[in-house]
Amino acid sequence: MRIDVHVVRVFTSKNGQYGSPAGVIIDEGSHISPQERQSIATQLGFSETVFVNRKSPAKVSIYGLQNEVNFAGAPLLGTAWLLSKQQGSLIEEITCNDKQIKVLEEDTLTWIIVDDLVGTPPWHHEQLKTYQEVEALSVDDEPYKEHTYAWAWVDSSPRIARVRARTFAPDWDIPEEEANGSGSMQLAHKLGRNLEIIHGKGSLIRASVGSTGIAIGGWVKEDPKITI
């Protein structure tokens, strides 16, 4: 059986560069077994691969390089964008592991919103003194060996809160993640601030907190499909 894999880069810069790549496989009816899904996700090598169990209303499962995961921000946002593109209108909701996630589009950005952070990965948030220290980090830095989200303020003024961040998770087979959605959600919630985050080499993540929930937003770009 040959399988088409849609490839999306999530949280790109405004001109479509950078972003975290994820694979999306349409498998309505869940014909691919959990064991095969894990094998495919490992073979593809993306931090996460999404399997769409149902397109409408959208229901998905996410597999990392090692195992199935409950929640991952970038691939969920990318999948919501892709399914909206395929059906020609914005999907309003996507379900993953029984968690209902709202989808919005605003100012050309796609957003996903959750009521709480239950089920999100256990990122270690490490604040550094300056954004230059974040930029100088290496994957060989010992303190960042266990799923760590390193960050520093660029501008912490009330008007605009800007953050520089990088994520390292070699213990999850991810030496460095270009854009970390769930970690950005957690940081916005922890700080109680709406954030503009430059992540990785140049990915752009918006994260916000408010009465409607905890949200992340960004641009998505689709790359050529892969067939395996």
Image (tube, rainbow, N blue to C red):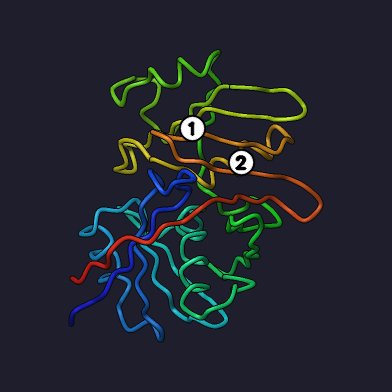
Split into 4 quadrants, where in the image is the C terminus?
bottom left
Residue 159 is drawn in which quadrant?
top right
Residue 136 is drawn in which quadrant?
top left
Q: Which of 24 and 18 is in front in this view?
A: 18
Q: Nearer the viewer, residue 200 or 141?
A: 200
* Residue found at x 56% / y 22%: 152
The label shown at residue 48 is: none
Contact? badges 1 and 2 (CB < 8 Å): yes
Tag count: 2
The label shown at residue 149 is: 1
The outermost residue toward the front is 15
Q: How far apart are marks 1 and 2 (CA)?
A: 10 Å
Q: Is residue 182 left or right of residue 43?
A: right
Label 1: which secondary element: strand
Q: What residue type is labelled 1?
A: Tyr
- Looking at marks 1 and 2 on the same chain, the residue that comes earlier in the sequence is marked by 1
Placement of 88 over or under 82, stated as above or below: below
Q: Residues within 10 Å of mark 2 (few under 14, many from 20)?
A: many
State the residue position of label 2. Answer: 186
Placement of 16 over or under 128, stated as above or below: below
Placement of 78 over or under 171, stated as above or below: below
* Residue found at x 38% / y 43%: 18
Residue 173 is drawn in which quadrant?
top left
Label 2: which secondary element: helix
Placement of 17 over or under 26, stated as above or below: above
Q: Which amino acid does label 2 sit on?
A: Gln
The outermost residue toward the bottom is 29
